[in-house]
């Protein structure tokens, strides 16, 4: 029994040590705020200060809440809208946003104690999508998708300023219309492709016809040029022959004595070759060589 006071003393020290550790853990004044966050210090629920990242001292009567200001995502699946030409449209969107650092106290007090505004962002995105799509026709939503996305981004930024949030970007996914409208679009695309195919075929036929016409015209031009050339040659030859005859006639007309001399030379040649025999038969119109009866006083 001599050791019982010593055991009791040891137990008492252990209990006191545990109590001290618990009190130190509970009342330890050194806390830290993670990167990308803000520390909201409150006393009895009232905001007393906003602390940046790093270590800080917190009194036992103060409460530190970690408030996230990093970028967050809010997904909006199958948001419904209607175009200006009354076509129902559905789309899924992903919105990336963050809380403005200078709006932490306001957001903490009014909307969220940790910086999560997902429900507010989703509701605002659906409202903005309906308002923007109502300004476009269904074909414009498809053909001007980048412009539609830009309009949604601008409108959503103005909308979420009320909640102290800044929109980083908006991604649109899975644009879809009613089955009837999609079938009509498909039929229209098919008709357009057929029309373009017919136009291309017509252009090909027209091109081929123009080529044939061009070839025919070239061949006709070649034939005409050839005929013109031949006709020109004939004309030049005839002109040359006529000019030659004119020269000969002019020469003969001016030199009748030369012509007579040539005739006499021919007659002399014939006389030199005559054997002195007269033809056995004389026709009425046939000349008898060198038998020219004198027309004067022959004795």
Image (cartoon, grey):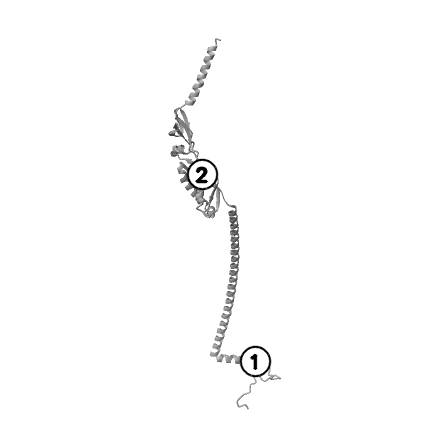
The furthest residue to the right: 280
Residue 217 coordinates in the image, percent (x, y): 51, 62
Which residue is at 41% across, 39% downward? 159
Residue 101 coordinates in the image, percent (x, y): 39, 34
The furthest residue to the left: 48
The correct choice, above or below, for 187 with respect to 159 in the image is: below
Which residue is at 42% across, 23% downward? 26
In the figure, residue 71 lies in which quadrant? top left
Residue 152 coordinates in the image, percent (x, y): 43, 42
Q: Residues within 10 Å of mark 1 (few under 14, many from 20)?
A: few
Residue 131 coordinates in the image, percent (x, y): 43, 43
- Residue 270 marker: 1
Q: Residues within 10 Å of mark 2 (few under 14, many from 20)?
A: few
> Image check: 102 left or right of 234?
left
Which residue is at 44% across, 41% downward? 127
Give the mark, 2 or 1, whose residue is nearer the N terminus.
2
What secondary structure is found at the residue carrying circle 1? helix
As rendered, which of 106 and 98 lies closer to the eye? 106
In the figure, residue 128 lies in which quadrant? top left
As rendered, which of 162 and 201 lies closer to the eye? 162
Q: CA distance from mark 2 to mark 1?
A: 137 Å
Q: How many marks?
A: 2
> Which residue in the structure is indicated by mark 2?
123
The correct choice, above or below, for 159 with respect to 295 in the image is: above
> Which circle, 2 or 1, is nearer the viewer?
2
- Residue 104 marker: none
As rendered, which of 150 and 260 lies closer to the eye? 150
> Image check: 283 left or right of 126?
right
What secondary structure is found at the residue carrying circle 2? helix
């Amino acid at each position: 029994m001599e050791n019982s006071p010593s055991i009791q003393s040891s137990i008492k020290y252990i209990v006191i040590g545990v109590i001290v550790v618990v009190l130190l853990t509970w009342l330890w004044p050194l806390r830290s705020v993670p990167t990308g966050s803000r520390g909201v210090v409150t006393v009895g629920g009232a905001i007393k200060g906003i602390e940046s990242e790093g270590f800080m001292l917190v009194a036992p009567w103060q409460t530190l809440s970690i408030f996230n200001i990093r970028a967050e995502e809010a997904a909006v699946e199958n948001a419904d809208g209607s175009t200006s030409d009354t076509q129902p449209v559905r789309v899924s969107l992903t919105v990336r946003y963050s809380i403005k650092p200078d709006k932490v106290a306001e957001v903490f007090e009014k909307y969220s104690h940790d910086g999560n505004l997902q429900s507010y962002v989703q509701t605002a995105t659906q409202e903005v999508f309906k308002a923007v799509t109502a300004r476009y026709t269904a074909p414009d939503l498809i053909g001007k998708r980048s412009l539609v996305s830009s309009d949604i981004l601008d409108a959503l930024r103005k909308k979420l300023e009320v909640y102290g949030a800044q929109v980083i970007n908006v991604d649109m996914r899975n644009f879809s219309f009613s089955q009837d409208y999609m079938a009509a679009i498909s039929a229209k695309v098919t008709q357009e492709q057929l029309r373009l195919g017919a136009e291309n075929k017509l252009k090909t036929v027209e091109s081929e016809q123009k080529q044939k016409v061009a070839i025919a015209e070239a061949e006709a031009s070649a034939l005409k040029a050839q005929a013109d050339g031949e006709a020109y040659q004939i004309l030049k030859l005839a002109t040359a022959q006529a000019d030659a005859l004119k020269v000969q006639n002019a020469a003969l007309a001016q030199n009748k004595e030369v012509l007579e001399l040539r005739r006499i030379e021919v007659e002399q040649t014939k006389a030199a070759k005559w054997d002195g025999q007269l033809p056995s038969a004389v026709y009425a119109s046939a000349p008898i060589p060198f038998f020219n009866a004198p027309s004067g006083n022959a004795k």
